[in-house]
Every structure is written in structure tokens, then in C-alpha cells.
Amino acid sequence: MRVMAFTSRNIKELLRDPISYVFCLGLPIVMLIVMTLINDSIPVVPGTPKIFNIEKLTPAMTVFALTFIMLFACIRVSGDRSSAFLTRLYASPMKSGDYIMGYTLPFGIIALFQIIITYTSGEIIALINSKSFDIINALLSVPLLFPSMVLFIGIGIIFGTILNANAAPGVCSAVITATAILGGIWMDIDTMGGAWKTVCGCLPFYHSVKYARFALEGNFTDMLNPLLICSAFAALIFVIAVLVFSMKMKSDKR
Amino acid sequence: MKTAIKINDLTKKFGNKIAVDKINLEIYEGELFGLLGINGAGKTTTIRMLTGLSAVTDGEAEILGHSIKTDMQEIKPLINVSTQETAVAGNLTVRENLELIANIYGMNKSDIKGSIGEIVTSLELDEVISQRAKTLSGGWQRRLSIAMALITSPKIIFLDEPTLGLDVIARRELWKVLENLKGKITIILTTHYLEEAEALCDRIAVMAKGKIKALGTAKELKKSADKDSIEDAFVEIVGGGV
Ligand SMILES: Nc1ncnc2c1ncn2[C@@H]1O[C@H](COP(=O)(O)OP(=O)(O)OP(=O)(O)O)[C@@H](O)[C@H]1O
Ligand SMILES: [Mg+2]
């Protein structure tokens, strides 16, 4: 009941402040189109598949777009924390888990729409280029992206909890950049190898992008490993989010 | 008379600064209790401790028999608070704000409907009921913030400067609401309007520098300070002597 009430408040706050979700839903489409146009103007190197090919690009872009869900989740939480409204809720029977669920569900719903929109746009671009995704794989990709979604919303809640409203967007931008560079969205990390790959492997973003690509390919055997790694990261991040939020609730009571 | 709140040597320190200094108080069920004091006296800090918003440094308080140190989770559903700062969800309408709080406190649907009806009438919120909170004027947001504390029919309600920013009419309306609640629920109220405290409160505690300097009915306070007006008595008690 408490979770539902708080969730519905957060959904209303989101829907009535359209910048966030319009941005979250519009951005991946624009990026897909831009990247495809760039891809078309890159000369073909024999033997290496273009990294911006739509079937590689779409899953990566979906993961990248989740970083913006993270950003807006972070802004919501840090904004709420600085308001007297949250103080009032602190005096209510709400528990820390209620807050986390109430923040996660609305952004989860938007993330779901975002994933569907990105894959649909990807498919349209593919069709224009006389290709097509395997529809079953594309459909399966949607629920398979659930761990990535939880991962990024969790990161957003953590930063929203520990940072104030001024610092939050800046730190999130750093994570967005890290995801782009260390997640292998614009480059093929596997061909680079070495220390770089080791660093990327220690963070969840690379695994997240990797398994999303395998999922769309229908290569479920190779997908399993990065999927499990990403899921473990997501679970860990979520636990940290709950802990950090309840610790912050306590320390706000000084 | 049954005790609603029993405070024993309650203390709050911020670093070296003592905001609330070993206060002792007993507030009875159904009482409308006024907490007065100059800026920085420790009124808000006291309320924050009693409502679980601020950790207790030392001492203890019991609310309806539960310790605020160990049983806050049992206390929370029984109380509600209107903080010194207006606290509303900006993008929600007045009705949605009220429903939100009612739902968070676990009220059932028919109770919510009834309570909203009552509050909306008594605080005359009907003309803004469908308006988003952030588009309301400051005073109207304040009324909503108070209504959100009343909506859950708490056994004890804490009102930290509820009439701050309200116009004369709205203030009188709130007085009427509080007078109607007198005897039914316990109300702890802070205010800088002394005539308001005199008109409403059964008993008044005057705080200064974290300590309770005087306690009694308005009449008793005036008598012990040997002054005719509550304002003169107050000045005498807090030692401002102009
Ligand atoms: N979070 C805090 N950190 C440090 N000092 C604080 C904090 N909160 C309150 N204080 C100090 O505690 C003292 C009591 O403050 P409090 O807000 O309780 O006063 P008050 O009686 O409510 O005053 P006012 O009438 O201005 O609202 C003040 O000296 C204040 O500076
Ligand atoms: Mg105060």
C-alpha cells in the first residue's frame, strides 16, 4: 500500500514534468539515426564488420539510453531529499525499502517503454536498409534487459542518495561517459584486448552491452556469461542502494 | 488525565551546541499544548525528536507508552506532523496530496473519502481541490500542508508554526478547526503569535536556550510574571527585558 501510494506519486510527478521522459524516449531514436548516418559514411574495411551496423548498434544504444534513466532517477531522488516533503514522509510509517521500490517502479516502466521504442526504431532502420532483426530474438531481448535496467536505476538511486541536487547531474554525466567508453558502445573492446579490456571487464557496462548484442543475435550460449555477470552486478547495486538509502535516512536524523 | 507524551531529561546537542537541554514535560491526552520561545529556543528540535526526525542525544520520551528511542515504528502511525517548512508534493493536486498521505498511513478507501470531505470543508480547500500544489500561493500551500497532517486522524498532532504565512481569515479558520479537535486529540503547537497561544492553548511551555523557563496556563504565566498581557509575561520569562 505504502509502496503503491509512493509509486503512483512518483509516476505522476514524472508524467507531469515531461522533459525527463520525453528526453528518455526521444534520445535513443535520435542517436540511432545519427549513428546510422555516420556508419553509412564510414568506408568499409574488408574483414571487419562495421561497429555501427544497426544490429550491433541497437542493443548497445538501448543500454546507453538506460544511463539517462539513471540520470533522471538520480535527479528525482536528490531533489526529493532536499525538499521538506521527504521530511514529512520520514515522519510517516514509510520504510527505506518502500522508498526504493517507489523510486524503482516508475523508472522501470519508462525504461521498458524506452527499450521497446529503441528496438522498434532499430528494426525500422534495419528495414530501410533491407535488413531485419530476428523478431523472436528482439522480443526476448526486452525481458532479458531487465538486469541492466535494475542496474542503472540502482546506480541512479545511489548517487541521488549520497549527492546533493547540485552535484548529482555532474557525477551522472561521468557515469554516462564511462558507460559509453568502457561499455564498448562505440568500439569493439574485444578486439582491443589488454589492460583496457581488463578495466572494462571489471565494470558492468561492458557485460551489459555484450549480452544485449548476443541476445539479439540469438547466440544464447555466449550470452549467458555476460548476462550472469551483469545480473550479479545489478543485484549487488540494488542491495547497496537499499543500504545507502537507509543509512542516509539515519544520518539525516542528526 | 492520561498522559500522551512524557518527556524525561530530553537533550539534543549539535556538536558542542546544546539545542535542547534536559527538558522535562508531561502532556496529557486531549490537551492543546503550546510550545513558545524566541528564535532558536529549541522548539523545532524538540518536535523533530518527538516525531523521529532527529536522533535523541540524551534522555528519553514516551509517546502513548512507546519509547521514541526504540519504538518509533509503532509511534509513527499514531502521530502526524506539519513541519515548520511547508511540505507538499508540487506536481500533485490538493486532493492527490491528501490521498497520498492517507494511503501511506494505510487508511481504507471509505475513510479516506470521508476524511478528505471533512478537511476540505473545514479548511475551505474546495476551491483549489483540483489545483496542483506548486501553483498555489504560499498560504494555500501552508493550509494544504496542515491538512495533510490532519487527514490521517492522528492521536497526536505536532504543528510547527502552522499559522505562519496565513492571512487573518485563514488563521481564524484554523483556530476553529483546532478548537473543534480540542479534547479529541492531543495537539502540540508552536507559534510566535502570543495572542494565538493565549486564545487556544490549555497549557503553555516557554522555552529559551533549550530549557523550559515556565509552564502553565496563560493566566498562570501572566500571574507568576506579574504582568497583565501575555506578551509582557513572555518577555519577562525569556529575559528579553526591553
Ligand atoms: N541541523 C542542525 N545543526 C546544527 N544546529 C542546529 C541544527 N538544527 C537546529 N540547530 C540549532 O539548534 C537551536 C534550536 O533550533 P530550533 O530550530 O529548534 O529553534 P526554534 O525554537 O524552532 O526556533 P524558530 O522559532 O526560529 O523556529 C538553534 O540554535 C539552531 O541553530
Ligand atoms: Mg522552529
Image (tube, coloured by chain):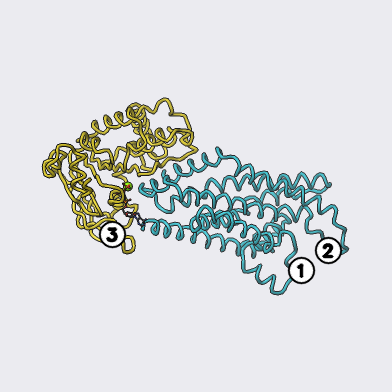
At a point 14% along the width and 37% down the height, the residue shown is B228
Q: How far is disc 3 from disc 1 in space, using C-alphas? A: 63 Å
* Letter of the chain that mark 3 sits on in the rendering: B
* Letter of the chain that mark 1 sits on in the rendering: A
Mark 3 or mark 1, whichever is nearer to me: 3
Which residue is more in the foreground, A112 or B37? B37
Give x and y (percent) for residue A102. 48, 47
Q: Which mark is residue A20?
A: none
Kind of residue at disc 2: Thr
Q: Which mark is residue A48?
A: 2
Q: Which mark is residue B18?
A: 3
State the cyan chain: A
Q: How far is disc 3 from disc 2 in space, using C-alphas? A: 70 Å
Label 3 SS? strand
Label 2 SS? loop
Q: How far is disc 2 from disc 1 in space, using C-alphas? A: 10 Å
Give x and y (percent) for residue A96. 42, 53
Both marks 3 and 2 on one chain: no
The picture quadrant where one finds residue A186 is bottom right
State the yellow chain: B
Q: Using residue A34 as the reference point, say whether residue B232 is left or right of it.
A: left
Kind of residue at disc 1: Thr
